[in-house]
Image (spheres, helix red, strand yellow):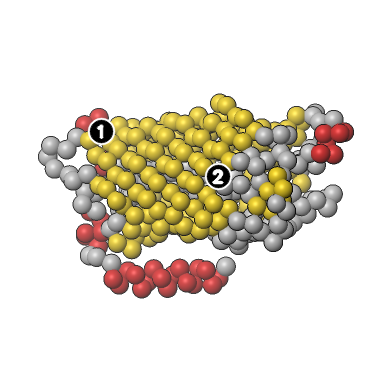
Amino acid sequence: MKKIFSLFTIFCLITSVYSKDKVELKLLKSPEKLSDIGSISDIGCDLCGCYMGIDPNYHLNIVGLRFHTFKFVTEAHTTESLAQNDHPDHEGTQSAEYYNNLELFGRYYITPKIKILFSVPFSQNNIDGKTLNGFGDAKLLAQYQIYNTDMNGKTKYWQRIFLGGGIKLPTGVYNKTLTNGSVEPHFQPGTGAFDFIFTGTYISKLLEYDLGWSNDVVYTVNTVNNNDYRFANRFNITSSFFYEADAGNFAFLPHAGVYFETAKEDRYKGEIAEGSGGSVLFATGGLDIYYKKFSLDMTLQLPVNENLNGDQPENRFRIYTGLGYSF
């Protein structure tokens, strides 16, 4: 982990020497006001995604902390279903699972059009009172701006398009056992495998009314870990509308939309892992608050429809909060 941070720091220092002038970096060929645009990129999934939040300070580097918690619930099982269940610790009338994640994140601009994103999570997962703690898998992404509307006095509708990708490193714990000795892959803070992440973002804003629309697509290609377990590839898309209200040094951005994720079944030793994969549609909403270069983001996701394969815990809610400082 120390080597990863050291290499990233050296990389940033070297590239900053060759970056363009700070004024040009800040403008990005468009106004620098907070009202210019916001960007939403919700988490891809409970294990393999990357959450970025609404970010009007898009032209600045940023560092911060984020916290998210997911809740899943499983109803009572028969003895037979418990024996076959992919989650053997579910007992009683209802079983609850909480996946808590504290994440150090950052963004660094190499050039006005290229930005690097990184995150290092620490997880505390609670399954019916039994906890699994440890560092999760670090992520390193890059995005390139392929289109940006030229700003002039007649511009009323502004658009930006980003494409990018990166990797998820197997830095997390993935072989911890529960009290019954089982090693359940989905309970682990990490996956134990290198994964490849591809992203695309479309942002637009009707400047006259301070209304915006953001669409983010994430596709994750997973590989096999040392346990011969392979999480299925995942596809996620977020579509959100937002509105900006300014009040002096403060800005408030309420946002609402939908988030969809889908995956096929996982594989264990080449065979389908029962009770894995499916699709879920969430309704999302939240509020982001900005004070100068400080930001606070809050998002709630509630499932409206899910189609899961086999016997799996049902989604109840997902909550995201984050504190950031732009510089």
- What's the distance in space between the residues labelled 2 and 1, CA to CA? 32 Å
Is 19 left or right of 171, judged from the image as shown? left
Residue sitting at 42 percent across and 73 percent down?
10
Residue 55 visible, this angle: yes
* Residue at (67% x, 34% y) in the render: 309
Q: Judging from the image, what secondary structure is the residue with disc 1 in?
A: strand
Q: Would residue 300 be visible to someone looking at this image? A: no
Q: Which mark is residue 234?
A: 2
- How many residues crowd around disc 2 within 10 Å: few (fewer than 14), some, or many (20 or more)? many
Where's residue 92, x and y in %? 82, 32
Question: Which residue is outermost to the left?
Answer: 153
**Of callouts 2 and 1, the N-terminal one:** 1
- The amino acid type of the residue labelled 2 equals Arg
Left or right: 185 in relation to 279: right
Total numbered circles: 2
Give the left or right position of residue 193, taking residue 165 as reference. right
Tell me what residue is drawn at x 83 percent, y 52 percent.
Answer: 181
Q: Are marks 2 and 1 in contact (CB under 8 Å)?
A: no
Question: Residue 297's x, y, as percent?
Answer: 45, 42
Q: Which residue is mark 1?
A: 206
Residue at left offset 61%, top offset 47%: 232
Residue 298, image x, y percentages: 47, 39
**Residue sticking out furthest to the top:** 304
Give the label, 2 or 1, closer to the camera. Answer: 2
Q: Secondary structure at mark 2?
A: strand
Q: Position of residue 248 (x, y in %)?
A: 28, 39
- The residue nearer to you, when weighing 296 against 116, is 116
Q: Quadrant of the C terminus?
A: bottom left
Looking at the image, is 323 positioned above or below residue 114?
above
Residue lying furthest right = 79
- Residue type at tag 1: Leu
